[in-house]
Every structure is written in C-alpha cells, then in structure tokens.
Amino acid sequence: GRYVMPVSACINQVSTILRSANNYYQDVPIHLRPRCLITAIHAAWRLIYLTLMSPSASRNRENHNDGFCLKRVMVCAGGACNFGPGAGAPSDLHLHPDAKRRIDKDAIEHNEDLAKDLTRVGALVDIFGAGCCPLNVPTLYPLTQNTGGALQVYEGFGEEYLSCLLAAFRRFTGKEATMDFRVSEGIEIEHVIGPIKLLTGATKRSSSCMTHNAVCMTSVERGHGVAVSFKLKRDLAFESAYFQIEICTQGCTSGHGDTPGNGFRHRVVTSEISVTEDGREFIASIDPTAIGVMIAKKSLLSVRKAMYTQKTIQSLKKEIGKRMYDIGYKFSPRVSGQSMWSKPLCVLKEKLAVLAEILYHFCRCPAMSDSTGHIDEKIVLFARLISADMATSVLMIWPRLTVIQPSPSGHVVVAENVAAVDIVTQMHNTLVLDCGTSVYVWMKRSMVDKDVSDENCYRNFIEDLTRGRFPSPHTYLCPENSPNFRYIQAKLVPLRKDHPDEQTRQLPALNSVDEGRLKEIRAHLLTSFQYTDEPSFLEWCKQHNITVNQPLSTRGTC
C-alpha cells in the first residue's frame, strides 16, 4: 500500500518546499485574492478523523495500550479568510457596520464549532501569518485559543518566519490536562487566568471529586502559566491558610515523533500561607512583580470584554493609578497636602515603589496603548500575555535593559542590568532591550561601522538570552538616529522630562559622571530624542498623588 510519512521523518523536504514558494503570479490586489483558509483546516481535521478511524490506527492503539497522540495543524497564512465557510466580512465591500459584525459573528461561531471537532480528535492548530494583509485575527482566535495552539504575526516570509515554524513543530506540547484548586475556609478563588477553558459536562462527570474551581488547560507546554487570584469572604481567625492545586495530564509530545510523557500523570501540590494582622509584615512578604502581573492580566480581561475600545483603556489606566494610591494610603507614610481639601501625598518605599514602577510600565506597554492600532496586533499581544508564564509576562510589561560589550576574545561580557531610561543610551555603546516577545539592540553611530565580530557577539548573546522561548522573539537592530530607533525610544522611560536633580536621584550612576560630560549628555539627549506626551515615572506618580524617593529598579525580570 501507500503511506503518508510523518513530518518528523521528512522535515528537510518540508523546509525546502516552504523556502521555494513563489510569489502570487496573477495581477490581483493582495486583499482580493481568494483564501479558503478555514476550508483547508476543515480538510485537515477530516483527514485526521479518518486516519484515527482506520483499522491500522486501532491496532496501533491496542498494541501501545495508549489512546493519546497529539496531532498538529500548522497554518501559513498571507491574509484573512475571505472565501468559503468561516470567512469574515470582505474588506473590498463597503458594508454597514452591523452587517460586518453579523458576518464576523457567524464566522466566529463556525470556527468555534470547528475547534470543538479538532479538540475531540486531539488536534492543535497553530496559525502563523505574515505579509502586509490583515488576518482578521478575531475570527481566527477561537481556533488557537480552544485547541491550545499559537497565533503569531510576522512582517514577511523570511528566515525568522521559517525558524518559528520549525520551533513550533519541535516544541513539547501536552493536551487533556485539568487543574483543580482547593483553599481553606473563608477564602475563595476569584480569577483563574491563562490558557484555560471551562470543563465540559462529560469531564466533570468522569471525576466526582472535582470542585467548582476546576478548569481544563488547552495546552501544557514550557513558557505557559496560569495566574490565580484569591478573595477573602471574611476575616480569618486562624494563623495559617492552605492552598492546594491538583494537576492531571494525559500526555505530551513533540515534533520529533516521540511521546516521552505519554500516559496519565497526577500531581498534587499544597502550600501554606501565613496569616498576619500586621501591615508591615504583610508588605514585607509580598512579591511586587507577581502582584503587578496579576493586576495586568485582570485588566487585560476587562479590555477584551469591552472589545479593546479606546475609552475602556483610558479609564483602566486611571483606575490603576487610583488603586496604587489606595494601596499606598493603606500601607505607606503620608504627607498632608498643600490645602485642607487636597489629598495627602503617599510616599512609597521598597516593594511598593517597585509595584508602582511595574504598573507604570504596564500603562505604557503596547497591549494598553490607547492610540489607534490594528486589532490583529492587539489580540496577538493579548493572547501572548494572558498565557505567558511569570518570567515572560514581566518582560512584556517591564522591559529589561542590559549593557553588553565585546571582550578581546570576541565573547560578550554582560556588564550589568541598568534602569530602562533614555539617558542610559548616551552613556554606553551597545544596549539590549528584552521585551519578552521582541528584542531590540541599540548601538551608537560609531559602533555601527565596526567589524563583523562585534555584530556576531551580540547575536550570540541574544541567542543565549532567548533560547527555549516560543514563539521566537523578533530581533530588531536599532542604531542611533536610524528609523528603527523609534522602537527603543518608545519603550524607555523619558527621564529627560524630569529636573536634573530628580534625574540624579532616580539614576545614581549619574553622580559618577563629571559635570561637563553630564551637560553634554543631557544636551545630546534632548536633540536626539523626539518630544513625547507620555509622562515620566515621577510625572505619573504626581498625577496620582504618590511619590517615590528611591532609585529606579534595574530588574526587569522575576
């Protein structure tokens, strides 16, 4: 007979086919080219279904005594689905907004039903878009969200795109996992955020010991995380509370054709949580980065519920500032205002200052941008941040700036992590800004024309920095005064807007620079950086009646 080889056995041939793809030969605008994307996914589902129902597949399951085998559907898309079932509203027709919403709603419902069929056969859908044509991500998002796949958008079908496809194929992925949470009396689970969905009735009936907090994970893989927030129903009368998590997984697989985790796994983890009435002891025990990430993810859920409207994002930014003030009012010293009607000024110290800084960066991150942006980019960022683990979430919210320099042997020497502020670019030659899903390399103009060995140094450093992450972060070279320089400029704190004394207090490294050099740095900073309406960190604090008297943190990771 004739058999279809698994992709793991012919990965080189698949890579050759993708690299040899030619441009579209007909003279048709890119947004008008017919694309039956959902029909192709449906055909893939049908092939998987028929394969599972074949006699040979049944015998294979009996011999291996295992019913789990992950199937993966990888979609390379150059535009939105505009033809066939599951197609969104055509972009070339001037439809009424209500008619467009109705068409997109029907497409989403169709794709949700298709995702249920794919989940029943254990299939995972990864969608990788590229090019200049929008993908209409809102209609495609149910396919990746409900099956546990990835949704990525790239600028073109280049080497970075192909490397991401290969990494997606080779990554470990688990399916059919459930999580259940149990807490002490007086505490309840408020939110569970991550790559999850509600349990079906059949799953609940199969395990009678599950609580109402149980959820089903759409995928289990490295780089994913689940955030859980608690709510007190009443004051706790005991000295310690307990939190227990129960995880059940069916199996995991990779693109190499092996299934090292095949089989049922069950794990229970119990943690003790101390209870205290002392405010200082409570503040000393918190992790400000974890609290900042939890606030960020809960805020993004509110943004998605309101369909990413500009009004909702602006109101959420104000609400985050008010919440930071309420925390400071409860747990930090206060200074009375200038008049009897003004609010007292809260002085944040240590961990509360770090929490204020991470919330400030969250209000500036691309996911919370209230300016006009494409809905595809916003949903991709939202999906990545919601499902990311702690380390990646912190980097996406609070970028980490690192000074690197080549040694005489050609290896990279990491000098230190510095505060992510604009004035640092005038004090060092090469900087790397790690934002989790993207990495930016800043170089002075004098360093751009140096030999290739310096370039290889920072590329090797970035490979070591991002090894193991999926999706692979975008890498941008941003030399001084180049068009890409705006990426760095938009993400660094505009310290140039503060008074020189406030700059020195926030960045103590300026004290080691002589006065003449410092004046030169500040003058060059004002001429090389464009004016921005975004407030600096101190200006943001003043808007919400809080102040921070300690230097900015240099840690952008947990």
Image: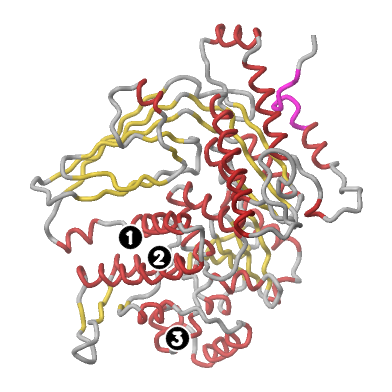
Circle 2 — which element? Answer: helix
Q: Tell which of 226 and 91 is nearer to you.
A: 91
Q: Is residue 6 left or right of residue 387?
A: right
* CB atoms of marks 1 and 2 within 8 Å: yes
Q: Residues within 10 Å of mark 1 (few under 14, many from 20)?
A: many
Name the residue located 52 percent from the left edge and 81 percent from the top edge: 533
| Residue 96 spot, x, y in % from top left | 65, 59
Residue 434: which numbered mark, if any? none
- Distance CA(mark 3)–CA(mark 1): 25 Å
Total marks in image: 3
Residue at mark 1 to residue at mark 2: CA–CA distance: 8 Å
Give the amino acid type for the residue marked by disc 2 in the picture. Answer: Ile
Residue 260's place in the image compared with 147, above or below, is above
Question: Residue 376's image quarter?
Answer: bottom right
For mark 1, give the secondary structure: helix
Q: Percent position (x, y) of residue 558?
A: 41, 55
Which comes before the other along the chain, label 1 or label 2? 1
Image quadrant occupied by the N terminus:
top right
Q: Position of residue 525 (x, y in %)?
A: 58, 84
Magenta part of the chain: 4-12
Q: Amino acid at mark 3?
A: Asp
- Residue tagged 3: 498
Residue in view at x 66 percent, y 8 percent: 56
Label 1 sits on what residue type? Pro
* 220 horizontally vs 467: left or right: left
Res 358 label: 2
Task: Kindly identify which residue carries mark 1.
Answer: 288
Which element carries disc 3, helix, strand or loop? loop
In the image shown, does 94 or 191 lie closer to the viewer? 94
Q: How far separated are the C-alphas under marks 3 and 2?
A: 19 Å
